[in-house]
Image (cartoon, rainbow, N blue to C red):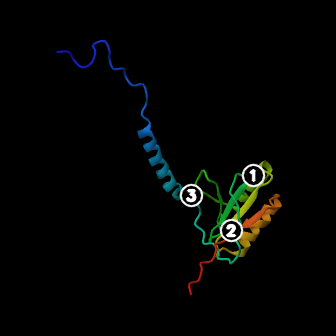
Amino acid sequence: MDSMQPQGQKRRPMADINVVPYIDVMLVLLIIFMVTAPMLVQSVPVDLPDVDATATDIKPDDSMLTVSVTADGLYYVEREEEEPQAMSLEEVVDYAGKMKSAVPETQVMIRGDQNVPYGSVVALMGGLQGVGVTNLGLITEAPTPQVR
């Protein structure tokens, strides 16, 4: 009995790649990165003071430097690539001066704990102005709304 397929014809292999499983894997990885990225932000724990003021729209970029002052008077320069290390006032001012000479539009944002002595933040601001950093800002927390 003859088969239904002619003898001379063979089935050719399919040369296309099925990309649907790759797209599924890519979407799962995207979701994983979107969920874990906010948890990876390393920051020095600082209890910021509550201030009733209008928030400003500042976008962090390469010309922004964030300096944290903890309640015990330690200074931390927050860089995205590594865990912040405690530094002396002179080291922070020297680092900011080098950054200012490399990137003239450097902006320094100061995160001062509400329990830090006032003199520690003022000494930092004075040192920064001494090396030419005049674009300074203070980071605060917005007060929690009162429920009535």
User: Residue at the top extreme?
Assistant: 8
- Is 128 positioned to the left or the right of 2 in the image? right
Identify which amino acid the numbered label 2 is placed on: Ile
Please report the residue visible at 47 percent of the width from the left and 43 percent of the height from the top: 26
Residue that mark 3 sits on: 41
Identify which amino acid the numbered label 1 is placed on: Met
Q: Is residue 101 above or below residue 69?
A: above
Q: Nearer the viewer, mark 1 or mark 2?
A: 2
**Nearer the N terminus, badge 3 or badge 1?**
3
Residue 52 falls in which quadrant of the image? bottom right
Residue that mark 2 sits on: 139
Which of 98/38 is in front?
38
Q: CA distance from mark 1 to mark 2?
A: 20 Å
* Rendering coords of residue 66 (x, y %): 68, 60
Residue 93 visible in the picture: no
Q: CA distance from mark 3 to mark 2?
A: 17 Å
Q: CA distance from mark 3 to mark 1?
A: 22 Å
* Rendering coords of residue 132 (x, y %): 83, 58
Q: Which mark is residue 128?
A: none
Q: Is residue 14 above or below residue 125?
A: above
Which of 121/108 is in front?
108
For the image, the number of numbered tags is: 3
